[in-house]
Image (spheres, rainbow, N blue to C red):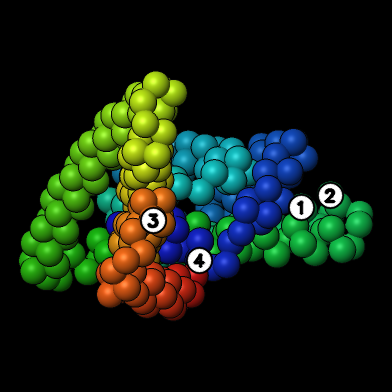
């Protein structure tokens, strides 16, 4: 299965592109019936399926085209949307539709969309930006459909590919389950750390201010670390890439916490410890900057 974050980066589809497409929803709603009719006329004029499956394929295609047209102009790119597109690719394999037919239909859809949008917008600069966004989003849609179709074709000729797919599918589901469990654990730990921080702030008003302040500061930094880890896990569940920089950041925060504690306690009598913490922060800071730069 493909992940939307990877495709979004590969095809350079930005949030502005998605907003551009969504802005067309009201305009293009008026052309929905024309779209379905024209695509069907073009398809049936060029290609002919066996009579026993012809009505079924047309009905399935009509249902897909209407739903796809609506979802396309909602412009909500996600893994669920890619899975929906891959189902259409699987449909082509089920009814033994030729690869050439799929590409021809996609080419026609692209030209049809381009022409309708071109006719509907008057401002040249705005129209150009909208069309660029639409074409990039179409590339993602067609990539997902073609991927599913080709994957099914390959599966016909090798059992190893089927086994590989099964292993990958099971691994992905297990990985998703573990990430979901991690998210739940991190939420619980973050809430617990926040409660602990609140209790320490209340204690700060009653007890030795210096001692409690250091403890509360440590708890605050721990909340920061947990929130960053939680954010990373959520992004991975959405299809984002694993980022090693988050763990370098955790180590960096830990040393910063030690430095703050040493400073607040006025423990400057041991220059070796103080120097070690400062050098560690500097080294980790450089490593974090280098890794974060490569991950962008």
| CA–CA distance in space, label 3 to label 2 | 70 Å
257 lies above or below 277 = above
Indicate the quadrant containing the N terminus: top left, top right, bottom left or bottom right: bottom left
Question: What is the x, y in percent for residue 284?
Answer: 36, 72
Of 133 and 105, which appears nearest the observer? 133
| CA–CA distance in space, label 4 to label 2 | 29 Å
Mark nearer the viewer, 4 or 2: 4
Q: Indicate left or right for 274 with 118 as reference.
A: left
| CA–CA distance in space, label 1 to label 2 | 6 Å
238 lies above or below 285 = above
Q: Are marks 4 and 1 in contact (CB under 8 Å)?
A: no
Q: Are marks 1 and 2 in contact (CB under 8 Å)?
A: yes
SS of the residue under disc 1: helix
| CA–CA distance in space, label 4 to label 1 | 27 Å
Question: What is the x, y in percent for residue 199?
Answer: 35, 24
Question: What is the x, y in percent for residue 195?
Answer: 34, 25
Using a 10 Å C-alpha cutoff, classify the residue at mark 3 as few (fewer than 14 neighbours), some (14 to 19) or many (20 or more). few
Q: Which mark is residue 120?
A: 2
Question: Quadrant of residue 216 in the image?
Answer: top left
SS of the residue under disc 3: loop
Residue beneath disc 4: 9
N-terminal of the pair, mark 3 or mark 2, is 2
The residue lying at 23 percent from left, 42 percent from top is 182
Question: What is the x, y in percent for residue 274?
Answer: 33, 69
| CA–CA distance in space, label 4 to label 3 | 49 Å
N-terminal of the pair, mark 4 or mark 1, is 4
SS of the residue under disc 2: helix
The residue lying at 34 percent from left, 38 percent from top is 211
């Amino acid at each position: 299965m493909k992940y939307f974050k990877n495709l979004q980066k590969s095809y350079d589809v930005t949030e502005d592109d998605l907003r551009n497409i969504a802005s067309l929803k009201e305009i293009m709603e008026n052309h929905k019936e024309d779209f379905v009719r024209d695509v069907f006329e073009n398809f049936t004029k060029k290609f002919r399926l066996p009579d026993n499956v012809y009505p079924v394929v047309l009905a399935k295609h009509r249902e897909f085209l209407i739903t796809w047209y609506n979802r396309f102009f909602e412009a909500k790119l996600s893994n669920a949307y890619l899975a929906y597109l891959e189902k259409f690719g699987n449909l082509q394999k089920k009814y033994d539709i030729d690869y050439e037919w799929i590409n021809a239909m996609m080419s026609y859809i692209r030209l049809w969309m381009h022409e309708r949008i071109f006719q509907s917008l008057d401002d040249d600069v705005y129209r150009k930006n909208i069309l660029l966004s639409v074409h990039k989003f179409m590339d993602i849609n067609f990539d997902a459909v073609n991927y599913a179709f080709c994957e099914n074709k390959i599966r016909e000729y090798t059992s190893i590919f089927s086994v590989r797919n099964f292993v990958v599918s099971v691994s992905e589901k297990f990985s998703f389950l573990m990430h979901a469990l991690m998210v739940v654990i991190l939420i619980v730990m973050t809430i617990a750390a926040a409660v602990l921080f609140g209790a320490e702030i209340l204690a700060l008003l009653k007890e030795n201010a210096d001692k409690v302040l250091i403890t509360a500061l440590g708890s605050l930094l721990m909340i920061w670390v947990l929130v960053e880890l939680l954010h990373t896990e959520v992004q991975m569940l959405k299809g984002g890439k694993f980022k090693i920089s988050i763990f370098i950041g955790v180590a960096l925060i830990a040393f910063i916490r030690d430095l703050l504690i040493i400073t607040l306690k006025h423990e400057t009598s041991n220059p070796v410890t103080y120097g070690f913490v400062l050098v560690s922060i500097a080294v980790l800071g450089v490593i974090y900057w280098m890794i974060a730069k490569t991950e962008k």
